Amino acid sequence: GHFLKSTEIPEVPIGTRFGKAVVINETVFVYGGYCENATSLRIVQVYNILTKKWSTLPPSRYSRSGATIIKDQLTLIGGRDTLYTTTSKLVTWTGEEWLGLYPPMHT
């Protein structure tokens, strides 16, 4: 695997506070955070370590989600929808689209 120093990745194009980041293979995903507009809360910025370029995914369905990796895919957990309704649903980026998963079971 790659060992990254923070100086090797250029600044995120859309600066946010309190975003989440995960690394899957040669890709860094930076999700959400707070900034000027609500769309930024749902944005996912993607840095390709090999090409050294930033891109963005379509906005996720939810803001204020947790972020993790499940089966080598970016998965967002819970959050709020555009009507500010809190959810416990999971959504995964398949490489082509956001796919909704069943909510976690409560014990």
Image (cartoon, rainbow, N blue to C red):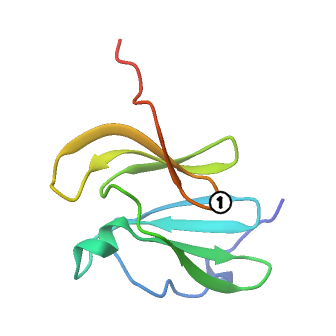
Quarter the N terminus occupies? bottom right
Location of residue 83 in the rendering, given as x and y in whole percent from the top left corner: 15, 55
Q: Residues within 10 Å of mark 1 (few under 14, many from 20)?
A: few
Question: Does residue 79 sit above or below 44 in this rendering?
Answer: above
Residue lying farthest to the right in this orientation:
1
Q: Which residue is mark 1?
A: 95
* x, y percent for residue 77: 41, 43
Q: Is residue 54 left or right of residue 36?
A: right
**Left or right: residue 8 compared with residue 34:** right
Q: Position of residue 98 (x, y in %)?
A: 50, 55
Look at 17% across and 46% down and name the residue there: 85
Q: Amino acid at mark 1?
A: Gly
Q: Is residue 95 toward the left or the right of residue 99 in the image?
A: right
| Residue 105 position by quadrant | top left
Q: Quadrant of the C terminus?
A: top left
Element type at mark 1: loop
Q: 17 or 26: nearer the eye?
A: 26
Q: Name the residue at 76% across, 67% down.
A: 26
Height in image: 45 above or below 91?
below
| Quadrant of the rendered image containing residue 62 | bottom left
- Residue at 36 percent of width and 51 percent of height: 65
Question: What is the residue that sits farthest to the top in this orientation?
Answer: 107
Q: Residue at x 65, y 60 (%)?
A: 95
Position of residue 103 measured from the top left corner of the image (x, y, whole percent)? 39, 30
Q: How many marks?
A: 1
- Measured along the vertical axis of the image, is residue 89 above or below residue 18? above
